[in-house]
Image (cartoon, grey):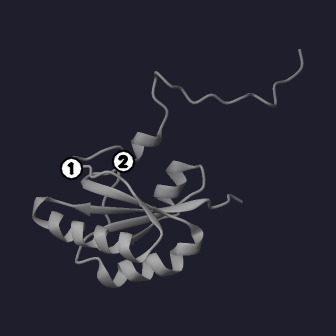
Amino acid sequence: MSQISSFHAHVYYDPSSREAAARVREALAERFIVQLGRWHDQPIGPHPKAMYQVVFGLDQFAGVVPWLMLHREGLTILVHPETGDDLADHRHHALWLGEKLELNLEAFLPTPSAPHITADLHRPSP
């Protein structure tokens, strides 16, 4: 079983909701021990909309997530653990507040320039 090292919350916004996203961001920083990521005004990685990331520890989960449930100002938020398996964390271990967006999970798959390498551990003897 994987270990959770921390959590990420991705707060999605568009030009009309950026002010609300800024209020949520400011309130999170005032109330909790969190690390705020940069504003990404364009889709990035698996994220289909503009967003910023909030990183918080296991000890903050019980405060941060219920607070977001009640104070997200209509924004969509993805919360997921950090286990070292980005694909599983975003696909299987995530929870959504608001509208569930379709993520670009191909961003986590190996590319031809960086192939996924696996060892053949059961090679028959000659």
Q: Given this view, does label 1 or label 2 mark the residue nearer the observer? A: 1
Q: Amino acid at mark 1?
A: Asp
Determine which of the numbered discs, if any, sits on residue 41 in the image. Answer: 1
Considering the numbered disc 1 on the image, is that residue within a helix, a strand or a loop?
Answer: loop
Q: Position of residue 70 (x, y in %)?
A: 33, 85
- Under mark 2, the amino acid is Pro
Q: Is residue 120 left or right of residue 67?
A: right
Indicate the quadrant where residue 30 lies.
Answer: bottom left
Q: Quadrant of residue 51?
A: bottom left
Residue 99 in view, yes or no: no
Q: Is residue 113 left or right of residue 47?
A: right
Measured from the top left, where is residue 28 in percent x and y?
36, 72
The residue lying furthest to the left in this view is: 16
Query: Which label's residue is closer to the chain start, 1 or 2?
Result: 1
Reading the image, the residue beneath label 2 is 46
Count every numbered label the image shows and give the total: 2
Q: Residues within 10 Å of mark 1 (few under 14, many from 20)?
A: some
Residue 14: x, y in percent?
Answer: 16, 59
Residue at x-position 52% and y-position 49%: 86
